Amino acid sequence: MIKLYGIKNCDTVKKAKKWLDEQQIAYEFHDFKTAGIRRDIIAQWLTQLSQELLINKRGTTWRRIPENQKANLTDDKAITLMLANPSVIKRPVLDNDGNISVGFSPESYSELLL
């Protein structure tokens, strides 16, 4: 089963959901802003993706985080940061039977899912 993680109001997540619906691909959506996200799930993502791919350092949430919390991020510190600030996670995160990808483009989803 495909699981799509993100925030329902995010434009990129909306595009990904629309694309999946148009392709008639079944998926489960998990809004990590309202439903939260578990430490073990983020840790699993980090086995396939780097912090640099998973953390959105261009958003307002990142800019609001104090510098001392952003400095010298180990994976464990990055997980703690993402748990406390789920909006800092790049979106959407797609879990396709354990294969994790982040972001959306019709081309990348076509390669991954069709």
Image (tube, rainbow, N blue to C red):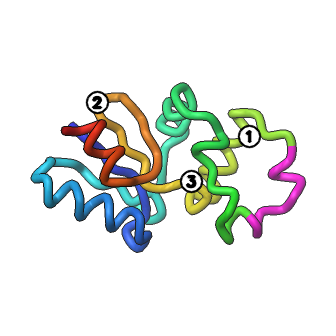
Q: What mark, if any, has residue 89 been given in the picture?
A: 3
- Main SS, magenta region, reads helix
In the rendered structure, which amino acid carries the disc numbered 2? Answer: Asp
In the rendered structure, which amino acid carries the disc numbered 1? Answer: Lys
* SS type, badge 1: helix
In the rendered structure, which amino acid carries the disc numbered 3? Answer: Ile
**Rendered view: 110 above or below 104:** above
Residue 64 sits in quarter: bottom right
Q: Looking at the figure, which quarter contains the C terminus?
A: top left
> Within the magenta stretch, is there residue 101?
no
> Which residue shows up at 39% across the image and 60% down it?
31
Q: What mark, if any, has residue 105 been given in the picture?
A: none
**Residue of label 1:** 77
Q: Earlier in the sequence, mark 1 or mark 2?
A: 1
* Mark-to-mark CA distance, 3 and 1: 14 Å
* Mark-to-mark CA distance, 1 and 2: 26 Å
Horizontal arrangement in the rendering, residue 73 relative to residue 51 (left or right): right
Magenta extent? 63-71
> Within the magenta stretch, is there residue 66?
yes
